Image (cartoon, rainbow, N blue to C red):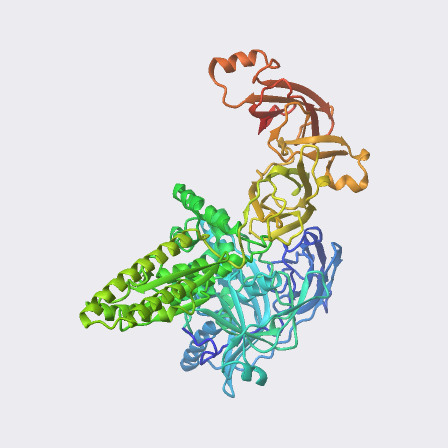
Amino acid sequence: MQNRSGFPAFNCSFFFLIIVFFLLPVQSSAQEKKVKATLSGRITDAIGKLPLENVDLFFDNTTIGDVSDKDGRYEIKNIPPGRYTLIVSLIGYKVEKVPLEVVTSKKLVRNFQLQIKIFQFQPLEVTAEKAKGWKKNLKRFVKLFIGTSQFAGQCEIINPEVLDFSNVSGSFLAAADTPLEIDNRALGYRIRFILDGFKVANNELSYYGQTRFKKKTPRDEKERLQWQKNRQTAYMGSMRHFLASVLKGRSKMEGFIVSRLVESQKEKREKAPGMIVKTPITIKKGALPLERVLSFSGRLQVEYTHERAEAGYLDGREQLSWIELTGSSVIADTGGNLLYRNAIKRFGYWAWKRIGDMLPMDFVPEPSIYFTPAVDSLEMLIRPEGYNKIHSELVVSALDELAFNNSDHAALIKQLHRDIVDIMNKPEINNWLKLKTNRQKAEFLRRFWLFRDRSFDTRKNERLDEHYQRLHIAKTNYAAVTPAGYDDRGRIYIKYGAPEGKVADVVSENGRSTETWVYTINGKQITFDFVDKVYGYALMYQPDESLIRFSNPIVQFAAVGTMLRKRQSISLTYFNAYNYYLELEREQDNNSGTYESKLIAYKQMLLHMNQHLNELAANNAAEQAKLPTIVSKQFENISELSYSFKPALFEDAADSYTLAFVYGIRINDVKLSVSGSENRPEIQFGTIIRNPGLANMVTDRNKIPLQTTSFNGNSELIYQNRFSLPVKNFYILSDVNNPAGKQRGFKDYVIKIPRYSQEKLHLSSVIFAEDIVPSASVAKAKKAAFLIRNDLAVKMNPFSELAAGEPVFLYFEIYGLHRDPSGKTKYNIEYTVNPVGKKGFGKFLAGLNPFGKGRGKISISYTQEGQEINDYFSIRLDFGRLKPGKYEMIVRVKDDNANDAKETKTSFVLK
């Protein structure tokens, strides 16, 4: 392993001096999806004014570009916003480099007149010796320029003959009058590199130029997927990935540990020599909406923990890199791309990666169902010496990946369960035993920690951090040959933390080594005694269990006294026992009989002492049995709060949706307060929407005071809200908190929407509502309590239980209807309510009388005509004739013009 406070003997720092950033990643914001510029123009010869064909125009270091036609015309479409350097290149002409800034979707026009490039030819003498030297220099150049990584090994310079090499004053130089053509078979790119300079001097490598990426066409689907995987691998852990994660505030969660070497005299006085201290990276807004200005002092060390270094990297097994600014700050876009590549010097692992691992700036990493970086990182840390690096952001992200992306990590799931065995309660232990699949177990572990999270809208879980800190201490200080890796001291430490008092008899001359720990839990003093056994320390249930049994009762009695005296200052139990011991001893002091009579007396005293100790041990064991599973400074005595949560999804436009949701809590489920609570009586609602990459998209926090006016006539507290979302697949995490009553509850839902074309019939969510009225009739101040759709105000019902005597409203939307030749739509809507559980002849009889008094079924059908391809429907239903029980409502829509039908099912309980 490399020394983390120093550097390798050879630090290769490489940087491009003139590569200017260009592209802001396409998926950084909704604004980018709207802003798409077009650049066009004409290219001619500067002298003859004739059009030039096959001129290569591209934005430096991207795949975006075009080639001029026979008339010299070009057009580059769909240019995302950002700053670019446009490169205009044709062999035989001088290269044009034009800065370009795209902020709107305008059509830009740029015409160019290229100047002929004058070549200075020198007489050339070719000898066998020179040819041998050129090949040796080429081999050196390829190693330095392309790199020696796994991907670099699959790269080839197609036209190496255009290179010239020289050695001047100890510097190795390379030049090429023609762009280098490079084939990267690992990443699927054909690269054209205009080499402006290449130099190796004083153990520092620098090269600069302009890069044109072209995507290759894969031979088959297998090769396409392999390129996609390799590109993602090249991105992960790169400096661009690091900068992007810093700007998102997710660097630690995405596997980066950032430190700074001690440099200042003040720091050297306060810290040990060479010690690494954490330092923040300052981030400010840039000139453009998606630009940021970063600054930091000194040289930062960055370790990427999600994977080991490649086998070909000779400076250590870890991915350790160092960076320093060449100026006071650096400008990057939100995707991690630098405006000026030479603004940061790189050392270590990042310097080792060269052209062979380089990606175009417009490459956008995509979440993959098999891509689990947090899981990969956690698997590397799940070992005794790695537990000090485990943190909640990493574990929470890994559990999300295991539950939602890929659960094929049985060993990790098993270890994560083993890590919590000592803090699980009995219902959780019983539930775990019922689980069969890895995904079920991963979901259990995820929910286990979510329920213990005080700030669920962040990836930081204070209780989880506390637990893994305790685990690290248990595995380090109380290591033992047990399945858990620690002894009973470690188990008690994990459950209750550090003891308030501790006495240790290490290799006691009167017996085996022992320790006594004392806690104050729930106002009572609890004592734990441990004795050293072969495999480690075990709980000792008899205080004198560790003592050697002497045949002489006088010696034995003295050994008991020594044990009690050492402990009487930290434990009330031992204090009382020691006083009892002293009373017996004083009685014997008055005995002036023979030695034989003293032996008999001491034997009797030992008997009384052991009886007293047994009573104390029994009382202590009884108090231990009453202890909570854990004692935590982060999470104490929280019970579950029962609540209802209903999400509903509606389409707004192409790839745009409204997510509506409603919470419901009944007053009987709420504890108004508990003794000792100083919190205000209120219910706190929290809703998180996360995208397929498990990043937070929307966070909603609200609170409603617990007072009579907050509940409706049915003693229900309702909270409703809605969001606009740009993605089809996401998941919802909902949380309710009653701080005064010490109650907490959470639910989560995965939303996966099938991809329908605009012409394909499909439905929105079907929701039950308490009321539906014209939106114009609702005061502006009260509209937040309604879902506003199609000029209607919908008050959603969060509960699955409906009252038989009250009206029920239904609302849903229809998309993708077809028009007939006259431009009209025609469709049929059928509502069917079926009882759940009725079978056989009884079900048949109930169906004959759908509105009779009984649990029969209701079937209602409507035919609608209109002109819009998207429509909505609402209806008021009366379930008054149905008996209480479980029902299922089926809503079926048939498009008569397309002869297509869709249906959806909703379950409910009638009270």
Residue at image location 30% in from the left, 63% down from the top: 544
Q: Considering only vertical position in the picture, is 720 above or below 119? A: above
Q: How many numbered discs, if any?
A: 0
Please indicate, yes or no, whether residue 268 appears anywhere in the rendered image. yes
Q: Is residue 895 above or below residue 222?
A: above
| Residue 846 locus on image (x, y percent) | 55, 14
Of 531 and 711, which appears nearest the observer? 531
Q: Camera-side residue: 664 or 85?
A: 664
In the displayed structure image, the side of residue 850 where residue 545 appears, left or right: left
Q: Position of residue 407 (x, y in %)?
A: 44, 48
Report the front residue among 910 and 408.
910
Q: Quadrant of residue 884?
A: top right
Q: Is residue 653 visible?
A: no
669 to the left or right of 624: right
Quarter of the picture holding the N terminus = bottom left
- Locate residue 482: give its quadrant: bottom left
Query: What is the quadrant of the C terminus in the image?
Result: top right
Foreground: 52 or 215? 215
What residue appears at the point 81 percent right and 41 percent down from the top-left corner?
Answer: 780
Q: Residue 645 lies in what quarter of the image?
A: top right
Position of 62 with respect to 316 (left or right) is: right
Compared across the picture, whether 654 is left or right of 503 comes to right
| Residue 894: percent from left, percent from top | 62, 24
Question: Where is residue 649 drawn, in percent x and y?
Answer: 64, 38
